[in-house]
Image: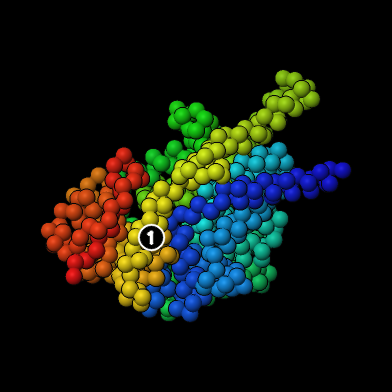
Amino acid sequence: MWRKSSTWLLIGLFVLAVAARLIPGERIIDDAYITFRYARNLLAGYGFVYNPGQPVLGTTTPLFTFLLALLALPFGGAQANFPLIAVLVSALADGLGVVLLFKIGQRLGSPAAGLATALAWAIAPFSVTFAIGGLETSTYMLLLIALLWAYLHQRIVLAASLGAAAILTRPDAVLLVGPVLLHYFLRAQPRPWQAGFWRSNAKAIATFLLPLLAWALFAWLYFGSPVAQSVAAKSNAYLVAPMDAFIHLLQHYGMPFVEYETFTTRWLYLGLWLYPFLSLVGTLYAARREPRSLPFALFPWLHFIVFAVSNPLLFRWYLAPPLPFYILFIALGVQKIAADLLPRIAAPRRLAPLGALLVALPFLFNLHGWARYPDPPSARPAPKMAWQRAEEVYREAVAFIQPRLPAESQSIVVAAGDVGVLGYFLDVCILDLVGLNSKETLPYYPLDAAMYGDFVYAVPPALIRDQQPDYVVILDLYGRASLQQDADFLASYTLVQFFPREIYGPEGGLQVFQRNP
């Protein structure tokens, strides 16, 4: 009877997660369109490139790019609907992910903690937003969660393949895969310095290393480096205030269930103490019961330390990876405390409603992070954070530029700070002003701090002067203290369209400049 009920529960969790990603529909994030263009160019015969003829590794998710290209083959190839394919893949990945989270809770001796985690992750804004946004996040999270499941079940070869796949999906997977490898080496019998270790683990080692080495060799020969150019570009182009990432991470770890939507940010004063304590209790409980869980319990904190110290500009999707693990060990901590204390207070039957409430609370908090009518207006409910104002105005820019292009538009160069929407919908050469996909951009950063004004990014006037693109499409914030103060730029370009929008502040919008004849 329990096995049958458990099967229906797993089906229900899967359906809930998939439905939570299909109901809002596509709300594609600008960065996702970059991956779509790589996949489309691959199928069109241009190679693994963003701009045809320019071999630049601008994406950090090669495996997801290949996956999209493979899935697009029977549905039109280069003409396939890549946004739809990406959302469907993400919905299925998250459906499987929540099922595994429940099974992991069972493995760790707490089906209730597994259920609470699965329910919370099924509708978590920090999961759904990026699934319907077309990013690789859901596929990446499935690989990390599956790695935990495989490692707990001592499926070492499977764990090795999942670890390699995770690194090829997002390189920051090394923050989890590395500790798992270290943990395995420290506990393995025979020991790594004994010959028997390498014989018994030869298949797992090959499964892990061969895909990584194959990609590294290809990337070195094709791009000149296995390291994505976007890594260097983002570290140099943005002016991030000291401790900025640390502050954002504190807020994130203190409100993992978007409690600011329910209690305002005042919850942070409680959450910063409550959740780390519960996570510590859950970690100690799980480590005693199943020592293999330890690297996964430590992963959120290693992620916190690395990102706080490196202090990058924290895009929202950087905050998602530690969350399901953080939530799981918080839930295990609640279960452990409840199991130790509550039976002394009342009979188990009387405590059943309280237990149900504890399981449901993370789900209810996350549900409050949804909007019936999200921004921009939509008839479909969606997470409040899945806003589309920037992508919407870039689509308007596409509609403005498209009729002005010649029949053979590949020679036209459009320069932009946000290249996703423009690059996907315009058949032109894109000059990436941040430098993710354009090598010629990198030497112009970092800029003098005065050029940034009151924002984190600015366009280098010298870059536009030297490259002379046909169009420059930027949010006005990107050029207020740089381009708009440069006499050469103002003499060489004309503002042909302005789309007023409140995107990063109460004033501003998107500017379209065209080079003068």
The residue under the point 52% across, 39% down is 373
Residue 149 quadrant: bottom right
Whether residue 169 can be seen here = yes
Residue 408 quadrant: bottom left
Whether residue 178 can be seen here = no
The residue under the point 69% across, 50% down is 14
Q: Residue furthest right?
A: 1
Amino acid type at circle 1 is Ala
x, y percentage for residue 69? 55, 70
Work out whether residue 164 or residue 119 is closer to the camera in this orientation and state it: 119
Work out whether residue 459 or residue 269 is closer to the camera in this orientation and state it: 459
Instruction: Tell me: residue 191, above or below residue 141.
Output: below
x, y percentage for residue 393? 38, 52
Residue at numbered disc 1:
399
The quadrant of the image that shows the N terminus is top right
The quadrant of the image that shows the C terminus is bottom left
The residue under the point 28% across, 52% down is 498
x, y percentage for residue 355? 70, 30
Residue neighbourhood size for the residue with mark 1, other residues' Cα within 10 Å, grouped as few (<14), some (14–19), many (≥20): some
Tell whether 425 sits left or right of 143. left
Q: Residue furthest top?
A: 345
Q: Secondary structure at mark 1?
A: helix
Tell whether 262 sits left or right of 341. left
Residue 493 quadrant: bottom left
